[in-house]
Image (spheres, rainbow, N blue to C red):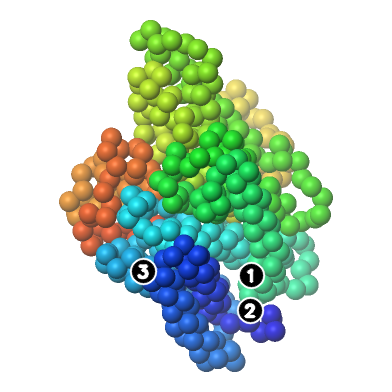
């Protein structure tokens, strides 16, 4: 039965999952006396349930191509078409906004961007807050599965840096990231989606449940704790209380959230490359080491900057204020590096301690670096940054010893060569994407600063940037229709990445 279901088109399967997900806010709405919203979600589940059922019957025995373009088109359809269905109950339950706003909100949640058009938490009922967090959580899981099952064999999404097969890496077996001299069977993408979906769902759900229980123990309410737990694992930054400062878990809750943000730094923390049952050495993972260097360096820089500022204004230098400032910098740096966008409760205190504002450009730079490959984080990915670092280090060594031969193994040589080349291509494409989105937003009437913040926030899937970086939060809901459509396209582009879009347009992909 499961095999027959997974042979359906990917978009139909995801529609079915979304229909089942609607029952959760429907039941929750009845428990908090939001009876109208509960009926909306229940009727939405019935309506789209019948629609999905009929589509499944119509497509059950239809022959479908196993070519790569089908699955790339399915990913594109996931972020373009599925939010239309997800926005219907949101729009009907809220009743005081346009359908376009609801659609943009659902695209933002599904792409784990977390850019909200409703920054005032009191504007939305509790059931809609739960729906936003749940959609973001599902989007994070879809990214987990699709990155390993679809993007990895095609050497996209950051995998192109490590694989030696270029875009013809479809000859991977289920253990991605490694080549084999003889392959007896190449798994179809549908088989890979089923295999990895079944394997990763218990891990994803278990981690979310563990963090939820931890936040409740720390003093958070069950509802807020669940939303924050789902947003942490999905790195969406969605909060029903306007951020961590609106909760009551305190620093204990932030410590637990910071611990679970590690899963957005490297896939080794949850997947082990699916190569064996042995537990890998996490410290050997280049993404984890690079993230540790970035977090420690920037945290130290921010702490010293605020400490010197406090000293210059004769602020009392006590241990409590110093440790509070240190933690605020550490958590916020880690949060924006993983593109979650949570702001520590001590972030504002660390600035008030010295009277200095922390430059928003630093947070945007962290978001552009991003988290690990095949994680829920957005941005450029740490593996690409690591490849460029190795290439730069090797070039400096050649200045001293021009005739030397680089060592460290075949993989390191590939990262310094072809991997660095592909990483540089991606960074150039990302820079061009930022310039393009900024130019389009400028045509809609946005000034340079606002256009830059909105472009980087959407392309890196770090929506909370618009609330923190600017002097005043940008009113996204007041943007005109063209600007909102541009932001929607930018969020989808940032989630799929430019290389995947280019691969979809490549004639080679359509021939295979």
At x 22%, y 54%, the residue is 478
The residue closer to the viewer here, 149 or 49, is 49
Q: CA distance from mark 2 to mark 1?
A: 8 Å
Count of all numbered marks drawn on residues in the image? 3
Q: Residues within 10 Å of mark 1 (few under 14, many from 20)?
A: many
Q: Is residue 264 left or right of residue 354?
A: right
SS at badge 1? helix
Answer above or below: position of 63 versus 423: below
> Residue 93: which numbered mark, if any?
3
Point out the image quarter for the C terminus.
bottom right
The label on residue 193 is 1
Classify 429 as above or below 508: above
Badge 1 or badge 3: first in the primary sequence: 3
- Name which quarter of the figure residue 4 lies in: bottom right
Whole-angstrom CA distance, mark 1 to mark 3, is 33 Å
Q: Where is mark 2, residue-wise?
A: 6
Mark 2, Cα crowd under 10 Å, few <14 / some 14-19 / many 20+, is some
At x 64%, y 54%, the residue is 209
Asked if disc 2 and disc 1 are in contact, CB closer than 8 Å, the reply is: yes
Quarter of the rendering containing residue 165: bottom right
In this view, the residue farthest toward the right is 278
Identify which residue, 224 or 8, lies in the foreground. 224
Q: Position of residue 234 (x, y in %)?
A: 54, 54
Q: Earlier in the sequence, mark 2 or mark 1?
A: 2
Q: Position of residue 197 (x, y in %)?
A: 65, 67
Q: Say whether disc 3 or disc 2 marks the residue closer to the N-terminus.
A: 2
Relative to 294, residue 243 above or below? below
- The quadrant the N terminus occupies is bottom right
Would residue 352 be visible to someone looking at this image? yes
Q: Residue at x 48, y 42 (%)?
A: 247
Horizontal and vertical percent for residue 506? 46, 68
Residue 344 rendering spot, x and y as whole percentages: 48, 35
């Amino acid at each position: 039965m499961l095999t027959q279901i997974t042979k359906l088109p990917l978009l139909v399967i995801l529609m079915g999952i979304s229909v089942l997900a609607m029952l959760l806010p429907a039941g929750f709405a009845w428990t908090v006396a939001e009876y109208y919203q509960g009926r909306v979600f229940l009727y939405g589940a019935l309506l789209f349930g019948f629609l999905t059922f009929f589509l499944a019957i119509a497509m059950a025995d239809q022959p479908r191509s196993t070519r790569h373009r089908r699955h790339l088109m399915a990913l594109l359809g996931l972020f373009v078409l599925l939010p239309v269905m997800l926005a219907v109950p949101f729009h009907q339950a809220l009743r005081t906004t346009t359908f376009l706003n609801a659609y943009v909100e659902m695209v933002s949640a599904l792409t784990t961007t977390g850019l909200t058009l409703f920054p005032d938490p009191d504007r939305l009922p509790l059931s809609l807050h739960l729906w936003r967090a749940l959609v973001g959580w599902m989007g994070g899981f879809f990214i987990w599965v699709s990155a390993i099952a679809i993007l990895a064999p095609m050497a996209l999404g950051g995998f192109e840096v490590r694989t030696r097969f270029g875009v013809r890496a479809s000859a991977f077996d289920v253990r991605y990231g490694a080549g084999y001299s003889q392959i007896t069977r190449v798994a179809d993408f549908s088989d890979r989606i089923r295999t990895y979906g079944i394997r990763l769902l218990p891990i994803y759900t278990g981690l979310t449940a563990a963090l939820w229980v931890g936040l409740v123990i720390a003093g958070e309410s069950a509802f807020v704790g669940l939303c924050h737990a789902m947003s942490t694992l999905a790195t969406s930054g969605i909060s029903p209380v306007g951020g961590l400062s609106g909760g009551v878990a305190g620093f204990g809750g932030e410590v637990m959230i910071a611990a679970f943000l590690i899963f957005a730094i490297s896939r080794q923390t949850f997947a082990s490359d699916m190569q064996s049952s042995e537990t890998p050495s996490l410290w050997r993972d280049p993404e984890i080491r690079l993230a540790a260097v970035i977090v420690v360096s920037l945290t130290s820089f921010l702490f010293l900057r605020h400490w010197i500022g406090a000293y210059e204004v004769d602020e009392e230098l006590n241990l409590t204020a110093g440790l509070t400032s240190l933690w605020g910098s550490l958590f916020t740096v880690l949060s924006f590096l993983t593109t979650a966008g949570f702001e520590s409760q001590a972030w504002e205190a660390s600035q008030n301690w010295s009277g200095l504002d922390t430059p928003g450009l630093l947070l945007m730079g962290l978001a552009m670096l991003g988290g690990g490959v095949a994680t829920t984080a957005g941005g450029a990915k740490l593996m690409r940054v690591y490849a460029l670092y190795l290439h730069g280090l090797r070039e400096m060594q050649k200045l001293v010893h021009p005739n030397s031969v680089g060592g460290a193994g075949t993989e390191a040589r590939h990262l310094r060569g072809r991997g660095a080349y592909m990483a540089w291509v991606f960074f150039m494409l990302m820079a061009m994407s930022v310039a393009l989105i900024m130019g389009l937003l400028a045509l809609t009437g946005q000034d340079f600063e606002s256009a830059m913040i909105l472009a980087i926030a959407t392309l890196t899937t770090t929506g909370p940037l618009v609330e923190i970086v600017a002097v005043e939060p940008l009113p996204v809901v007041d943007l005109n229709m063209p600007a909102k459509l541009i932001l929607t396209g930018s969020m989808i582009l940032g989630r799929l990445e430019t290389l995947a879009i280019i691969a979809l347009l490549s004639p080679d992909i359509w021939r295979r």
